[in-house]
Amino acid sequence: MLKKLLAQTKGYRLYSLLSPLLILVEVIMEVNIPFIMADMVNKGILGGAGINYIVNTGLKMVIMALISLAAGAGAARFAAMAGMGFGANLRNAVFSKIQDFSFANIDRFSTPSLITRMTTDINTIQMGYTMVIRIVVRSPLMFGMAFYYAYKINSELATVFAIAAPFLLLLLAGIFSFAMPRFKKLMKKYDGLNASIQETLIGARVVKAFVRAIHEKDKFRISNDELKDASIAAEKFVILSGPFMQMTVYGCTIAILWFGSQLVISEKMELANLTAFITYINNILMSLMMISMILVMSTMARTSLNRVGEVLNEIPDINDSHADPSLLVENGDIDMEDVCFKYKKNGKKNVIDNINLHIKSGETVGIIGGTGSAKTTLVQMIPRLYDVTEGVVKVGGRPVADYTLKNLRDSVAMVLQVNLLFSGTIEDNLRWGNEKATQEEIENACKIAQAHDFITSFPDGYQTDLGQGGVNLSGGQKQRLCIARALLKSPKVLILDDSTSAVDTATDAKIREGFKSNHGDVTTLIVAQRISSVQHADKIIVLDDGKINAIGTHDELLATNEIYGEVYKSQQTGGIE
């Protein structure tokens, strides 16, 4: 894990090195100034060394202060650049890893949790990294050098801190060991809050339609209160570090002032040296405060590191490890041999059970069945959105695992149940199917999908801005754009997963006719609830509880299959009524 994190510093390692080097210069200059000042007072003012000695020593101190200032500013800048760059690289690495995840990988984490890990967790790690290359170097260095000069001025007084500091550090370490589990719980509450926000914003129209705003406010308030309580539970242990640290340090300061004044009165110590000693006390105090901050941040960062590490260490269920990069899909033949599937490997029941199926290239096949019959799961195994648990799925006569994911998915176009469009223009969304498509190709695909007319009715036509998720389109318009986008891929296999459910029957019929006229050589799988959408298919598969109940044409199934007959009858009756 450490190796993976260090790899994300690429491009910013020079800044990461320059920052602590400049901090070293800053601390050396800063710590030497009080010692030189005490020497100037003792020799120049009280010792009678003369005005030249005082001026020269003063100039030396000014130069050292300016060097310390410049070094400190440079260190802060380089640390910020290194931290921001590291955070950006880490976000890119996590996002790239997520792009390789299968649906099963994403299901294991959940979308809100992945969002939290890419935002809150990485921001925490980024701040921790910036702190490491600045404060982690500065604090021990300042503590050590300040204690060295304090010991050099008066070893007896320095022993006060020598006794107190280890005790304080052990106490702080104990406090933060208790805080660690609470920070883990805190990050899970962030996941819960993000889930609540995401659901409410995505389903804003449903919330308003069902007048559930008060319910959503209450749900958010509960998640928000749980996050607040978890934050308090974690922070209350961290807060204890402040009083303990101040009590120890100020107790040491009082002891040093008491014993130091006695030494000055007895002329065993110069007043200027006591003043310098007190300055070093303040330096040590600041160092301990920064060490306390380091412990706070390290506790939080460690939790976030574990969470981000889980994503980076996750092995995608679906990969190209056994694929032949040169292998392309030759045709739209689809074969399923003894296919079984479970969402979880240790699951007790197969979602897909013992499917054997052969579909010839160019055939149009309908898939119908009740809710939960695994229609969508079945077709998602063709482009390897899920991998089979047992058996084999073949496309073009070869197991799907023989193809790279890119070559396979470039040959299989799928219109999912959820009609997802992205921010940008209509043309931008259509070009997801083919970035290099000509305007004529785009318009032809839209005409087949029965989308061209409504697109050209907009003032800006194909340059109409859709907004996030296509909020200014109807459900049927979104479906037709998604179909056109899929057609632009010129696929060998086209999967329509209930993709005309929001389209009227007349438009549905025109879309089917467009497929037949222009893409007759493409294997088309139509998952549908309406029999009218599949009754003209070459054959229809009836699924029941993850198993094939029957296969046949519309007329054959109507005459022989009870499930198909009941669905047809209920839809016809419903249409008449």
Image: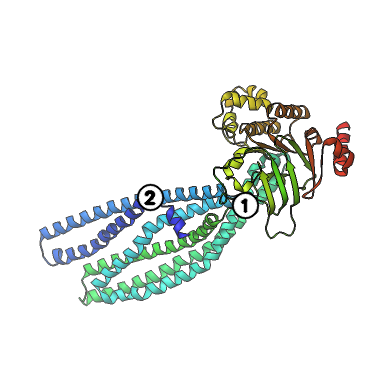
> Residue 278 at x, y = what percent?
29, 67
Sequence-first disc among 2 and 1: 2
The residue depicted at 20 percent of the width and 63 percent of the height is 36
Q: What is the x, y in percent for residue 46?
A: 15, 66
What residue type is disc 1 on? Ser
Q: Is residue 381 visible?
A: no
Quadrant in which residue 342 is drawn: bottom right
CA neighbours of label 2 inside 10 A, class few (<14), some (14 to 19), many (20+)? some
Exactly how many numbered labels are in the figure? 2
User: What residue is rendered at 33% in x and 57% in y?
Assistant: 20
Tag of residue 110? 1
In depth, the one of 496 and 187 nearer the eye is: 496
Q: What residue type is disc 2 on?
A: Tyr
Quadrant for the C terminus in the image: top right
- Residue at 48% x, 62% y is 299
Q: Quadrant of residue 284?
A: bottom left
Between 522 and 286, the one lying in front of the other is: 522
SS for callout 2: loop
Give the numbered dot on residue 12. 2
Q: Residues within 10 Å of mark 1 (few under 14, many from 20)?
A: few
In the drawing, does residue 189 fall left or right of residue 389?
left
> Is residue 117 toward the left or the right of residue 379 in the image?
left
Residue at 86% over, 32% down: 575
Q: Which mark is residue 218?
A: none
Report helix, strand or loop for mark 1.
loop
- Can residue 165 be seen? yes
Q: Residue 562: where, in percent of width, then height? A: 88, 43
Q: Are marks 2 and 1 in contact (CB under 8 Å)?
A: no
To which quarter of the image does residue 493 belong?
top right
Q: Is residue 338 above or below residue 273?
A: above
Asked if residue 382 is positioned above or below residue 132 in the image, the reply reads: above
